[in-house]
Image: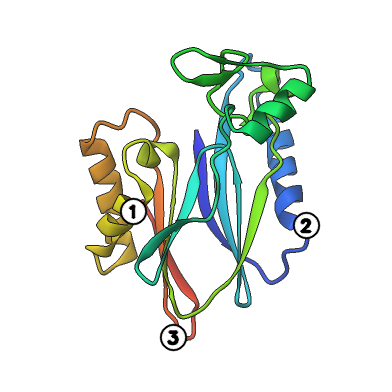
Amino acid sequence: MSIVCLVLLGNLGDLAGESYQQTDADFLDSERDIYRDDGSTASTAVLVGNHLYVANVGDSRTVISRAGKAIALSEDHKPNRSDERKRIESAGGFVMWTGTWRVGGVLAMSRAFGNRMLKQYVVAEPEIQDLVVDEDFEFLVLASDGVWDVLPNEVAVEVAKTEEEPEAAARKLTAVAFSRGSADNITCIVVKFQHDKAGPASPHQD
């Protein structure tokens, strides 16, 4: 499962971190009595004035098209990232290769909501990026790993550029990911910045 969303707020503060921690607690509580141990990733964009805050947990990713270039605004939480591996091992866990790098030989990401059995190592603390929005910001692509598994950042931006409307761009990205054989959750939102209009952005999802 993956969560990809755009949130418009007037005051950020520590809301992102607190919201992620509360979501994690609620996720775990919802599965307490049904004997399941699922998990989810998330990528969140928060617009406060002319500041864009991007938070992520897991391997959902936010990419911006800025002056025609694809720039990742989040870094995937993979177990083989040196800082993530060090954090996991410091907590008493381990990372091993079983077709891909996995926490405890089980989970192919190092941060997520849920995943009760690995919760000591798989945390839900987000990493947050802060950018000042300017005229070069064209659009955002927020997507789950089902898109990024088969589409490099640059290709995703080029595909999105072929459609004028963000909803159509999101639909095209999911279709292209599926056609390329993606076997994971395919979720996508495209957000276009409209600098010459009253509203700063127009979100659509598929």
Residue type at mark 2: give it: Asp
Q: Nearer the viewer, mark 1 or mark 2?
A: 1
**Residue name at image x 57 percent, y 14 percent:** 96
Residue type at mark 3: give it: Lys
Q: Which residue is mark 2?
A: 14
Residue 50: quarter of image: bottom right
Crowdedness of circle 1 by 10 Å Cα count: few (<14), some, many (20+)? some
Q: Are marks 1 and 2 in contact (CB under 8 Å)?
A: no
Crowdedness of circle 3 by 10 Å Cα count: few (<14), some, many (20+)? few
Q: CA distance from mark 1 to mark 3?
A: 27 Å
Crowdedness of circle 2 by 10 Å Cα count: few (<14), some, many (20+)? few
Q: Is residue 44 above or below residue 125?
A: below
Please report whichever mark, 2 or 3, sits nearer to the chain's N-terminal start.
Answer: 2
In the rendering, at what x and y percent does residue 173 appear? 29, 49
Please report whichever mark, 1 or 3, sits nearer to the chain's N-terminal start.
Answer: 1
**Residue name at image x 22 percent, y 63 percent:** 162
Disc sitting over residue 154 in the figure: 1
Along the horizontal axis of the image, is 8 left or right of 24?
Answer: left
Applied colour scheme: rainbow
Q: Is residue 42 above or below residue 137?
A: above
Please report whichever mark, 1 or 2, sits nearer to the chain's N-terminal start.
Answer: 2
**Residue name at image x 56 percent, y 29 percent:** 109
Q: Is residue 157 above or below residue 114?
A: below
Q: Is residue 186 visible?
A: no
Disc sitting over residue 197 in the figure: 3
In the rendering, at what x and y percent does residue 62 appear? 49, 53
Camera-nearest residue between 138 and 114 = 138
Q: Are marks 2 and 3 in contact (CB under 8 Å)?
A: no
